[in-house]
Structure formats: structure tokens, C-alpha cells
Image (cartoon, rainbow, N blue to C red):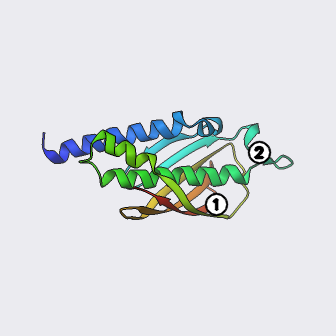
Amino acid sequence: MSGMEQNQQKYQALMQRLGDVFSNKIPFHQLIGFEFDELSAESCKISFKKKPELIGNFVHGMLHGGVTATALDVVGGAMAAAGMLGKNLDASDEEIGRKLSKIGTIDLRVDYVRPGKGDSFYAKARLLRSGNKVAVVRMELHSDDDTLVALGTGTYMAG
């Protein structure tokens, strides 16, 4: 197996572990019900179902704005982490763990475009810039009928 193939396998294993951590190890993410549908160097996508605990406007059954912001932040943070991992494939597991423990939101801007109506939602992200210490990510939240609900831009500590 070539070095490039080994790096690709290592990266895929890291992405699987990262998705598991974000979905299954963070209690707040479990409460909301985030599932990772895609996590790669190019993009990240999560989804979740609407449930009564996530409603902000009970008259119209709309998603709470805090859940919207959280979904954007989670998909953005995962994308920043994926970008950082892609640049550190030669690092030891210990070094990767250290770098992942430093991932954090520096700034998050959310533009609420439409009410969060629907039975389920998905958020996707793409990396705009991944530096040695900081990553910038663009995110979108959509309802199950592909209606754009919110846009986000996040700056993350990534290393």
C-alpha cells in the first residue's frame, strides 16, 4: 500500500472517530439528536429531526433559534476539525488528540433567513480557510424540503 493510500485510510478513520465524538460523546448534541451524514475534507453535513424540546415558537411549531445556531456551530466546528486533521496526518494519535481538544468557536455569525418549519433539518458546511491556528467556515441550515433557514459564518481555533 502506498503512503498516499495509507494517509487516505488514516484520514477516513479519523473522520469516523470525529463524527462519533461529535454525535455520541457530547451530551447536548445527543439531546438534539445530531447525526453525521457526511464528514470529509471538502464538506460536512449533519441532520436532526424536529421534536417538541426543540421548538421555540410553540404557536407555529418553529425551531428554536438557539438550536439553529447550535446546528450551524456544530457543523462548522466539525468542518474546522476535519480541515485541521487533513493537514496533520503524520501526527501521532496523542498529538491529534491534543489538537482536537483545542478546537473551539472564536466567533459565530448567524443570519436567520426563514422560520425553521419542517419535520427534519440538515446543516452543511464548507471550509473557507484553514490556517495553522484558525479556520473560517461557511454553514447553511435547511429544512427537509430544502428551504434555506439560516446562514452562518464561523471562525474556529483549529490547532
CA–CA distance in space, label 2 to label 1: 16 Å
Q: Is residue 39 left or right of residue 28?
A: left
Find out whether the residues at labels 2 and 1 contact each other: C-beta distance under 8 Å: no
Q: In which quarter of the image is the N terminus?
A: top left
Q: Which residue is drawn at 47% across and 51% down?
A: 103
Q: What percent of the width, then of the height, locates residue 57?
A: 82, 50
Residue at the right extreme, as displayed: 59
Q: What percent of the width, then of the height, locates residue 82?
A: 39, 51
- Residue under pointer 1: 150
In the rendered structure, which amino acid carries the disc numbered 1? Ala
Dot 1 falls on a residue whose secondary structure is: strand
Q: What percent of the width, then of the height, locates residue 115?
A: 73, 57
- Residue under pointer 2: 55
- Residue 34 is labelled as none
Q: Which residue is drawn at 60% across and 63% down?
A: 151
Q: Quadrant of residue 28?
A: top right
In the rendered structure, which amino acid carries the disc numbered 2? Ile
In the depicted structure, whether residue 146 falls above or below residue 134:
above
Dot 2 falls on a residue whose secondary structure is: strand
Q: What percent of the width, then of the height, locates residue 64?
A: 74, 50
Q: Residue at x 64, y 57 (%)?
A: 147
